[in-house]
Every structure is written in structure tokens, then in C-alpha cells.
Amino acid sequence: MRFPRQTRFILIVIGAAALFSCLKRDAAVQESPAQAAFAFHGSPAAGITFLSTQMNPVEEAGKMRKVILKDFPGRVDFRPNDSSYTLEQIDELLKADPSGPLLVGANHGDLVSLYERGKLRSLDTLIWFLSGREFPASFVDLCKLDGESVFYVPWMQATYVMAADKRALKYLPEGADLQALSYDQLERWARLIYEKTGMKALGFPAGKNGLMHRFLQGYLYPSFTGSTLLKFKSAEAESMWAYFKGLWRYVDPGSLSYAAMSEPLLTGDVWIAWDHTARLMKAFAERPEDFVAFPAPAGPRGLGYMTIVAGLGIPSGSRDPEDAGILIDYLTQPAIQARTMAETGFMPVVGLPAGLAIPDRLVSLSAAVESQSTSARAVPTLAPIGLGELGSEYNNLFMLTFSEIVIGGKDIGRTLADSASALQSIIDEAGAKCWLPDISDERPCRIE
């Protein structure tokens, strides 16, 4: 049975929650003989260039090179960067050496952009060869970008959650449930801490290389408007921005320089934070007993949240895809998936050996992910799809809007109208369709 693409994403969310809930949560990961006994199906004839939009932070990139890839039987040049640069690099590398093995790791939206430009090779034979990995059927379905053939192989998944220093818990507003907060309660919580301690305890990664734009796109907008784009300049959006401007009074000013929230949590500069699970992991790795993770708050339209599904694709211009296929084989083996989870916090997309224990540092984070994705009020949101190199401009406009309204104090209505016009130009140039939670048959997507 074939499902519409929007329905398939809901199935992915359900599949992810089931995967998290089936993992044991009481001890550190150790590579048992069953886990460690992965087999190589050949060795690459040449060094492989691995372009990736994932694992950009220096620490994550270092773990990828030194730990995750250390047992691969060949040379891998791992090059993480942002989406627009990575997409440009593909053409340059293929032009310079069409025979050089090339692999691309990116989120679903970027891979869709590559497919729509005819730059991804069909991987039906490879996915059949890897069928024993037990990829969830809904994940494989999402990889069928033309509805029939697989154009990338699932690699890993992640999302964004909240985290708090346990010192903040005594200031929770009366009647508030940490596992089911509202945005109003988050504001009261931050205000109470400020009134009692003088500390602006809430933090966001709003600095260079931070992921604050995903908070705006996947959390605030869906929670307050039920949309990530169509309702960008709606009355509901104006109310949302007014709320967030008020909330910012209790946000640590250092947020404008933070790229990730683990360090400010560890130093105590913030007590409450939002970020990508992988970028929160250092705090939980160093002091798991001091922090707790929990779902993002809910707004008037529900609990907006964003799930990131990353995949591995082989550019269609590459003349010799076999070597890149060997690297895909390696990265999706259960032992390497478990290693990736333990080292970076990115969650697996394959069945893992029975009895696998989640590391202590991931127990609270994985529980928050599960609770968030299975909430009755969940509003699942995809990262932008079909923007290609324009994705960075799209993200920057959300941050510009934030800067002008929240930091600069500009008129909300006029600012949203101007930003909506600029966003629409990007959507028009890319010819992009709407993506979840926005549903429209019109192409390009039209802001209301």
C-alpha cells in the first residue's frame, strides 16, 4: 500500500518513537561480540570524499573522523559544511575528477533538492543488499523520491529538545508538568528564576553556527500558528512574536553568541536551554546527574517540533559508485550505528542487537525525544525541502526577522510583511512545494 508523502512522515515519527522505546536504558553501551562482529563487503579501491551537511561542529567532526570511521578499510576524507556549500562542492568535485568516489550525507530536504536536479543515483540494488539492516519501512518509503526507486539510504535521525539544570526545577510554576509544559509556563518559569535569583537563566543557540532558526521554523511557528511558512505573517504569527519578545527579557544575553548549549549549561550560565540532541550531549556526558531533558513546550496550536532524517546518497555523475556503496554499508552496520549514537547523540535507523543499553548520557535525551514525538498534541514539522543552495538564505531570513523584532524592536506587522516578501522570492526561485505541517498542492508554495 502506498501512502501520501505527508502521511509517510507521520509514520516515520511513529517508527522513531518505537525505536527509542525499545532500547534499554540502564547502562553504558559496550560492544558485545555480536555488536563488534561487523563484516566488510569489500574494500574501496580509492580514497572516498564524504561531503556532509551533518556533524559540522568541530567536536562532532572529530569524533566522526577518529572514532566512527576508524575501522573502515579505506581512506575517507570527511568534509562537513553547510547545505549551500556542500551542494556546490558536488559539482566542483565531479568536474575535477568524475571517477573519484564521492558520498553525500545530508538531511531529507537537501537530498530532495539534489534529486530534483537530477544529481542522485538510484540505489535500489544497494538497499536490497542492505535489507537485513531492518530499516523501518516508513524510512525506506521516504527515500523513494519518485515514489518507486530509492535514491538515498537512511543514515541517522535526530531532533531538538529542551534541557535543564536540576537547580532550576524548584522554580517551576505551581501546577506545571515538566513533561507537558506550555510556552506560557516556560515564560513564567524563566521569570520566577529571574525574580528570585536575578539570573536570566533561559538560553538559545542564536550565535554563528547555532540552530536557532530551527527553533523558529519547527517549534515556535507550528506551536502558535500550526504552520511553518503559510501563516508566516498571520495574526497568530504576530501574537507569537510578541510573546517571544516578552520571553527574551529572561534570556541570557550570551545566547547571541552561543553555537551550542552544552557549554553554557555546564558553566551554569544558563539553567534552561533548547538545542539539537547531539549538541546537548556533552552536558549529559560530563554530568548526567545534574541535567534533565524534556519535550519542547506546547502553544495554542499544539507541540510543534522538528525531526531530522539524514541519509546517504551517491551523486549521479560519479562514474564508479561501488566504493561509496562500501562506505554506506559500513555506516549502516548495527555496530557503527550504535557507535554513532554513543559518540554523537544521533539516533540509529537500523535494528540494533537485543539487549543494547543506552549510555547514561543519552537516557534522559532519548526519553524526551520519545515523549515529544508521541505527544497527543504533536505538530510534526519537516526541515525546508526543495530549496537547494537557497536554504541558507531562507534560514537567515528567519534569524533576520528575529533580530529585527526581538532585538531591534521593529514593528512586528511591517517586519513580517517585508520578511514574507523576501521568503516568497526564495520559494519562487526554487519552485519549492510546501512541506509539513503546511499542505498545499500549489507550486511554488504561497505564503498567505
Image: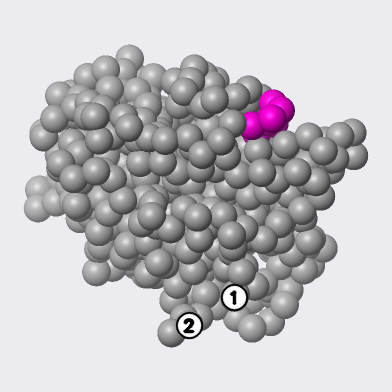
Foreground residue among 12 and 328? 328
The answer, for residue 216, to whether it is visible in the render is: no
Whether residue 171 sits left or right of residue 125 in the image: it is left
The answer, for residue 55, to whether it is visible in the render is: yes
* Amino acid, disc 2: Arg
Residue stretch in magenta: 44-50
Q: Name the image quarter holding residue 287.
A: top left
User: Where is residue 5 shown, x and y percent of the image?
Assistant: 52, 75
- The residue under the point 63% across, 50% down is 313
Marks 1 and 2 close (CB-CB < 8 Å): yes
Q: Secondary structure at mark 2?
A: loop
* Amino acid, disc 1: Gly
Dot 2 crowding, Cα within 10 Å, few <14, some 14–19, many 20+: few
Cα gap from disc 1 to disc 2, whole angstroms: 8 Å
- Which residue is identified by label 2? 2
Indicate which disc, 1 or 2, sits on the residue closer to the N terminus: 2
Q: Secondary structure at mark 1?
A: loop
Q: Name the image quarter holding residue 161.
A: top left
**For residue 46: magenta?**
yes
**For residue 345: magenta?**
no
Q: Which mark is residue 312?
A: none
- The residue under the point 80% across, 46% down is 319
Whether residue 53 sits left or right of residue 127 in the image: it is right
